[in-house]
Every structure is written in structure tokens, then in C-alpha cells.
Image: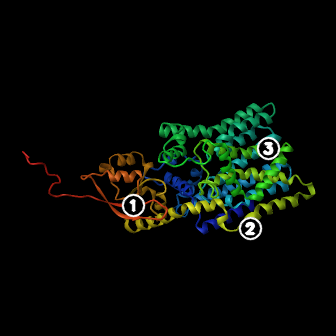
Amino acid sequence: MGLALALWSAATTAWIARQGWLLYYGDAEAHLNIARRIVDSRTPGYEQTGTVWLPLPHWLMLPLVRRDELWQSGLAGAIPPSVAFVVAGGFFYAALIRAFGSRPAALAGLAALALNPNLLYLKSIPMTEGLWLAALAALLYFNVRYRSSPSLANAACAGLASLAGTLTRYEGWFLIPFVAAYLVGAGDRRRWRAAIVYCLLAVSGPVYWLAHNWWLHGDPLEFYRGPYSARAIYQRSLDQGMARYPGDHNWRQAWIQFREAARLCAGWPLAAIGIAGAIASALRRRLWPLVLAGLPVVFYCMSIYGAGTPIFVPHLWPHSYYNTRYGLAALPWLAAGAAGAVLLCPVKWRTVAATFVAIASAGWWLAHPRPDAWICWKESEVNSEARRAWTARAARALQVARKPGEGVAACFGDLTGVFRTAGIPLRAMLHEGNGPAWLAAMARPDLFLREPWALVISGDSLSVALSRLGRQGPRYDLWDTIFVKGGPVIQIYRRSIRYDPDTLYKSPRRGQ
């Protein structure tokens, strides 16, 4: 089983890399470059870990992202989640066998998970879905194992799985109290000790991240309410006149947005089979695997309702694509439900039923073999078209004009993709992560902005700083402007200094 999963994961990742899709998602580019700047920066080190995104995905990229060819291709960020997918499949299969006592049912659930093209795409690029799925599947396995063998070792393993999850995605934080309550309810006379062991390990992730934010920014909730948080970005957009996200403080609409994203991610056949199987499993009192796998669904509905996290699907207002991948949170629940559906058949027919579930789950996608039918790929393709175009043009421009060793000032974010594409090391880049050097350059560009080049998105903080340069300071001449339909205006500036030989360094004449 492990070998088959490994070959399947390697094949799908290689195919997606060959198509050139590894960095279509802007978040994939950002995850890759955050990992790179930890080892390649003017100020490399721990401080480059960042604030909002949890650190484990970036840490796992570090051994690979040091290599220029793996960084530039994006493979440095694709390999860790591809390996995690294999781990996830193994734990999920083992958990279903223990939960349902049926190998055909477990194979049906694994097939529903492993044959989903949206998941296969996201686990093959520098995103967090593969790692989160591995943590969730391991947590599910050790929970089910604890039920039949309530030991401190199983509780500790569940805690380690939770720890990995809490350092990967914030829904991992949400699961902790529910798992702790389950360990108390399902354990023996040592259940309280088991719950304490679990909590000590699981809670260390959130405690560490709160301490990290407090140490670097003076606010333990910087990731939640800081200037780069989802809430702050949403509020700035509202202040500029944007309409509220669908589902914002509307439970019904929040559920509709998530439900439609989940349906598009999973496909109708698996959705129908999974729901039917979940109901049947509940009637048979096999609840906990479905409850644990379903808690991320609750988390995302709550996030849409109150945390400024939107999901846009093309057939609902505002008729666009955004965060559709969050619908994959329902996939483990539906896959577990599909496994439960197999148990509705007599034992001698379960192999046939499992085959039917696998064919139905994959058949929907085989009937729609185009990538356009994969909602997560389609979102990345549509939303990145302009960014990919201006990134390539800006990279070519810098490759032609910039001499080796010359520095470039730019805001870290989408513009960092220009450096990766051009093969310019990030230590040549002055950006927000460089602390005092960047802050000084933004506060007094006339004194501290010394880079030969500046790359800006019109209206960003660096372009504002350039506009404040006075007559006596350095001058940055506009060297190139890049316009792409649907994208921002990209400007490249080159530094020059104006000298007036008649007035420079001369004192006013006495008496004048």
C-alpha cells in the first residue's frame, strides 16, 4: 500500500511540475519564498519565519530550498507535501480499518481521497493541504487506536500529530479540546493522565506561536489582528468601499458558500455516497471518526461567518474564484462516509461495493478529464494569469539591465516571484523582512535608500517612499513600466544622483 501511494504521489507531482503549474497559486509562491528567505536574505535566520502563516511547511522546505534549481523550479516546495500525502494515505487507511473493521471499506475510503484531482493538485505544489491531511489522518488513527487500547503512548502519539497540525493550519488549534474530551470519555482509569499528556503536546504548538508573535512583534495575536492578518486586510478593503464577503455574519450564507465549494472539490457522486455512508455510520454508533473528520468543516463555516475568511465560487455572487480549496476540508469526512457506506452491504458483497465507490469517486473526474473541471486548479489558473505575465516580463527586464551584485529594493510578496524567476538571490533584495534597514529606507529614503534598483507595484509603500525624495536626495528614474491586463502597474526604477556644480557644496555669500 505504501509503495503504491508513493508511486502515485511521485507520478502526479512529476506530471504537474511538467505542466508548469507548481506556482500558479500566489500562496504557493509565497510559501516557497518565505522558506527561501530564512536561508537567503540580507538578514537570514529565524526572524524570517514570518507572522501569519504557521511555520512547519516552511521548515520542511529548508533542506531543499537552499538549492537554487529547486527553488527556481518550485520543486523545493512541492516535495514535502507530496511525501506527506503518502503518510496521510497510510494513516487514513489504517484508521478506517480500525474504525470499521473492514479492509474493503478502508480501501474505498482511501480511493475516494487519493483519486481526487483537486487534492492531488494541491498536495503537489507548495501548499499546506498535504501536510495538514497527514496530521489529521495520524490524529484520527491514534484516536481510533486509543479507543481499543487506551494507553499513554497512544495519547502521546495523538498529541504529536496534533502538534504537527497546529504548526501547519489553524484548524488544528480548533480540534484540541474536542480530542481531549474524547480521550477522557473513551479511556480507562488513566484517562485523565492520557488527556493531560495529549494536551501538553498539542497545546505546545499554539503556545509557541503566541510566544513567537509576542517576541518578534510585541503582540501574541499579531497573526490574528496585525497588519498582514486576514482580518486587517479585509477591514482595509471594506474601508476602501468593497462589499462585505458573502457569509459575513450570516450563518446560512456561510454554510452555502462552504457547501458549494465542497461539492465542487469532491464531485457529486462522492458527496452523495459520503453523506449516505455518514448517516449509516451514525446509526451504527461509529461516530468519532466522522466527528473528528468533520470538525474542520465547522471551523471553516465559523471562519466565513466571523473571521474575514471568504470563499467565492463561480456560480454564486460575486461569481469569481477565491479560496475554493477550503472546500477540501470536507473531503476526509466524505471519504470516511464512503467507507461507512460499504458496510451497508453484506460481507460477501463488500469488495464489489468498495470497487463501485472507487469507480464512482474517480468516474466523475474521468468524465470531466480537463483541468478546467478541477475547481482548485481553475482558481489558480484564472487568478494567476496576470501575475504570471507581469512576473515574467519584469524578470526579463531585470535580467537584461541589472548587473551581478546590484541590489534591488522591493516589497516582499508577489514581487518576490520576479527574483525567483530571474534567478536573483534574495540577499540582493531589500524588503520588509530586513528590519531596521528597510524601516530606515522607508522613513528617510533620501538618506538610507541606496539600492541601485527599485521594483514597485504602483501605490505600495516603496513607491510612496520614492515619491517623497526631495531635490537634494538621490533620484530614481523610471526605467520601465509593465502593464498587463487585469494586473497592477509594475514599475522599475534606476538610481541616479543629480549634481548641480554651481550650487552643490557652496555656501551663500556673506551678506546675501
User: Do tag 3 and tag 1 residues touch (Cβ < 8 Å)?
Assistant: no
Which numbered circle lies on residue 491?
1
Amino acid carrying label 2: it is Ala
Give the residue displayed 64% in from the left and 65% down from the top. Answer: 372
Rendering coords of residue 72 (x, y %): 52, 63
Rendering coords of residue 360 (x, y %): 79, 62
On the picture, is 159 further left or further right than 347? Answer: left
- Residue that carries the numbered disc 3 in the rendered image: 145
Rendering coords of residue 150 (x, y %): 80, 38
Q: Can residue 133 be seen in this view?
A: no
Assess disc 2: are there few (<14), some (14-19) or many (≥20) residues with their C-alpha within 10 Å of its C-alpha. few
Whichever of labels 3 and 2 marks the residue nearer the N terminus, that label is: 3
Q: Regarding mark 3 in the picture, which secondary structure is present there?
A: helix
Amino acid carrying label 1: it is Gln
Give the residue displayed 54% in from the left and 48% down from the top. Answer: 243
Rendered image quadrant of residue 492: bottom left
- In front of the other: 38 or 465: 465
Q: Nearer the viewer, mark 3 or mark 1?
A: 1
Rendering coords of residue 424 (x, y %): 44, 62
- In front of the other: 245 or 207: 245
| CA separation in Å, label 3 and label 1 | 58 Å
- Residue that carries the numbered disc 2 in the rendered image: 367
Rendered image quadrant of residue 32: bottom right
| CA separation in Å, label 1 and label 2 | 45 Å
